[in-house]
Amino acid sequence: MNRVLVCGAGGFIGSHLVTFLKNEGYYVRGVDLKYPEFSESTADEFIIGDLRDPVLVASLLEDHIDEVYQLAADMGGAGYLFTGDNDADVMHNSAMINLNLLHASVKAGVKTIFYSSSACIYPEYNQLDPNNPNCAEDSAYPAEPDSEYGWEKLFSERLYASFMRNHGIDVKVARFHNVFGPEGTYDGGKEKVPAALARKVVQAKNLDEIEVWGDGEQTRSFLYIDDCIDAIYKLVKSDFNGPVNIGSEFLISINDLAKLYINISGKSLKIKHIEGPQGVRGRTSDNKLIFEKLSWEPQLTLEEGLTKTYNWIVEQVNVNQNESLLVSS
Ligand code: NAD
């Protein structure tokens, strides 16, 4: 039985990946600072630990691990990454994790390591036109990410590539574009736009206003979690190393995303624009390379994915409301 380590196994994508790998028959060791927030982990072992600690990282790989899936990072949505307030933590913490993991993986003889980079590495100058952004893999240089989060990801991509070159470890690098779905953070400040908007719509009463940061004309594309997991696994099982985009090419403005949620809810709601961090003006995945190398493309439509996410957030909000009713009664 192949043995794998999933780093960031308590996070959104990591916890879904653990479940997928268990279903595929792997022995899964998960590690994170915390357990998954919304359901029990299905990992064979779940270690609560800090990947900035090199001693812990070495111990995780001591007894033979074939593959490492590296999803741990200090990250959040625009409210966390684009205000500048968390830059030192974001760069320091994530770089430490990647430095430790690569060093220990080579030492322990790990065959393959998957690294989750981000669309945030792409240069801002190619993402000024909301209707025509360029995020083809070969457009990454000359580099000009619009956040320190993007710069750290780019540094780490290069770190992984140099370890493959100099130490022979098989490295797979994916650049995720806005992955969303059930069991992702939806409040507290680290939530990303598809979860934040769903929560606002769920909590609004009929005829209320919901708030959108900026003018809402900024564009993005969104990938449902199951499609993301499928692409990660195809990449790891292929002989292609990347970096490669894992995302959707369906470009939509944040206003239109909010309208889709409003339609799903059946409520009549208005959008109110307020000041807030927005990131680049336009961004979408370019899937030519992943289709050519892995014959992969997303299977779910945006509306199908949003409906599943909306329904899950309805359940969460109801549970929380019932709990607060119980406490106050
Ligand atoms: P997430 O925040 O839900 O998961 C990351 C996990 O890493 C968290 O559970 C966190 O506790 C853990 N972690 C952070 N620091 C740690 C440390 N020092 N030691 C141990 N664990 C630590 O994020 P996610 O959405 O699941 O993203 C997974 C990866 O994909 C991240 O590397 C992220 O940068 C990348 N990514 C995600 C998206 C997206 O849309 N979700 C887009 C681009 C890139």
Image (spheres, rainbow, N blue to C red):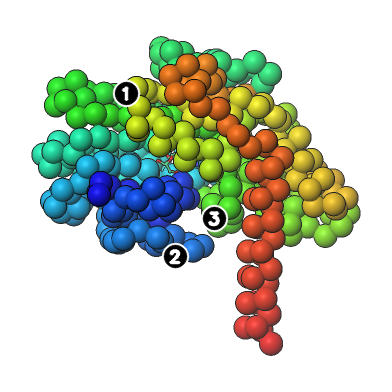
Query: Quadrant of the rendered structure where residue 29 is?
Result: bottom left
From where the camera sits, is residue 30 visible? yes
Q: Position of residue 109 (x, y in %)?
A: 13, 38
Label number found at residue 40: 2
Q: CA distance from mark 3 to mark 1?
A: 31 Å
Residue under the point 66% across and 21% down: 130
Badge 1 marks a residue whose secondary structure is loop
Is the CB atom of the residue marked by disc 2 within 8 angstroms of ligand 1's nearest atom?
Answer: no
Q: Read off the residue under disc 1.
A: 239
Within 10 Å of disc 2 (Cα), the crowding (few <14, some 14-19, many 20+) is: few
The amino acid type found where label 1 is placed reads Asp
Q: Nearer the viewer, residue 305 or 198?
A: 305
Please name which of the two marks, 2 or 1, marks the residue nearer to the observer. 1
For disc 3, the marked residue is 183
Q: Residue at x 29, y 61 (%)?
A: 45
238 or 184: nearer the viewer: 238
Residue shown at 42% from the left, 35% from the top:
232
Q: Position of residue 269 (x, y in %)?
A: 85, 49
Sequence-earlier tag: 2 or 3: 2
The answer to whether mark 2 and mark 3 are in CB contact below 8 A is no
> What distance separates the C-alpha of mark 2 from that of mark 3?
11 Å
The quadrant of the rendering that contains the C terminus is bottom right
Where's residue 168, x and y in %? 16, 25
Q: Quadrant of residue 294?
A: top left
Residue 79 in the image: state x and y as whole percent: 55, 44
Q: Give above or below for 226 relative to 251.
A: below
